[in-house]
Image (cartoon, helix red, strand yellow):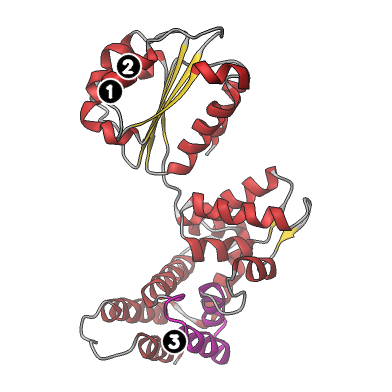
Amino acid sequence: MEEAAQIVNDIKKGNIKPIYLLMGEEAYFIDKIADYIDDNLLSEEEKGFNQMTLYGRDVSMEDVVAQAKRYPMMAERQVVIVKEAQDLSRQIDKLEAYAENPQPTTVLVICYKYKKVDGRKKVLKHIRKNGLVFESKKLYENQVGDWIRRVMSGKGYKVDPKAAYMLVEFLGTDLAKINNELEKLMLIMPKGSTITPLAIEENIGISKDFNNFELRRAVGEHDVVKAHRIINYFAQNPKDNPTVVTIALLFGFFQNVMTYHGLPSKDKGSVAKALKVNPFFVGEYVTAAKHYPMKKVSQVINLLRDADVKSKGVGAANLAQGDLLKELLVRIMN
């Protein structure tokens, strides 16, 4: 995240490389850097003759190199952006000679998504020497909430931690999807406002009361009535609440409760760091640890493992997913 922002800041300051290789599993940061270069390096008048976007599925590496070797027309530089460059993975070595001696008046941007160039290849070494290599890594689930808050803070909004959790639970770690939903919210909500669970429910359609976050809290607080109400809702809306996801999230929660029991220091900062959670959520683990001693947590983890296998059709072929969750909940909270 910080590296992507630094690359953009360097470009703003005029530190522009002749060749950028943007690669890795997380497409969002690759697109952000490429879009900034696309929008800002040339004026609108210069773009007509000096800016070209190519697609890996439509061109060969020889085409890319030929375009990069051209001289700009009535401009200081030209920009060549190669999107979906992973489609040229078998031809990447053909870029080697150009990468060793890139055209100084060309900015070549290679968007190589969802994979990496083999680190042993000479072409990578040449790009590192003469240009810039950026590896865009997937964020872990426990990092995405903080990313949401940082992005929105930079745009003048606050985000309730529960609202961030709801987005991650519903959309996963796909930053592009999350960003799209955040942009919709920014069109509706005035700058300076706080994005709350209610705003998420009203504008994105995620229930603020019936979701895995609330189930986790109800189970941790040993609120049997609330937990069963949520599970019944899940059973009635199975497409929006996959059993496999619910079990996985409960498993992660109880793993953290187990870790909490073994921590030598129970102050909020130490717990948040050890569990890799926002300090806002530490209280949930404190409460859960009171209701579930270590021996019980061990039993619950075994129950969740068993339920996970059954949810995938092993040993419970005739058991409805909703019934599986109800049975699991009874056994956890007994």
Cα distance in 3D space between marks 2 and 1: 6 Å
- Give me the residue at 54% from left, 75% from top: 211
Name above or below for residue 320 compared with residue 63: below
What amino acid is found at the position of numbered circle 1 in the picture? Met
Q: Mark 1 vs mark 3: give the one in front.
A: 1
Residue 5: mark in rendering: none
Sequence-earlier tag: 2 or 3 = 2
Depth check: give the residue in front, 92 or 46: 46
Residue at image coords 42%, 77%:
239
Q: Does residue 128 lie above or below 311 as drawn?
A: above
Q: Where is mark 2, residue-wise?
A: 65
Label 2 Cα neighbours within 10 Å, binned few <14 / some 14-19 / many ≥20: many
- Which structural element holds mark 2? helix
What secondary structure is the stretch in magenta mostly built from? helix
Relative to residue 224, is residue 253 depicted above or below?
above
The residue under the point 27% across, 16% down is 96
Q: Give the image location of residue 290, x and y in percent.
A: 55, 79
Residue that label 3 marks: 235
- The residue shown at (34%, 42%) is 114
Q: Quadrant of the C terminus?
A: bottom left
Can residue 239 be found in the magenta stretch? Answer: yes
Distance of label 1 from label 3 (alpha carbons): 52 Å
| Tag 2–tag 1 contact (CB < 8 Å) | yes
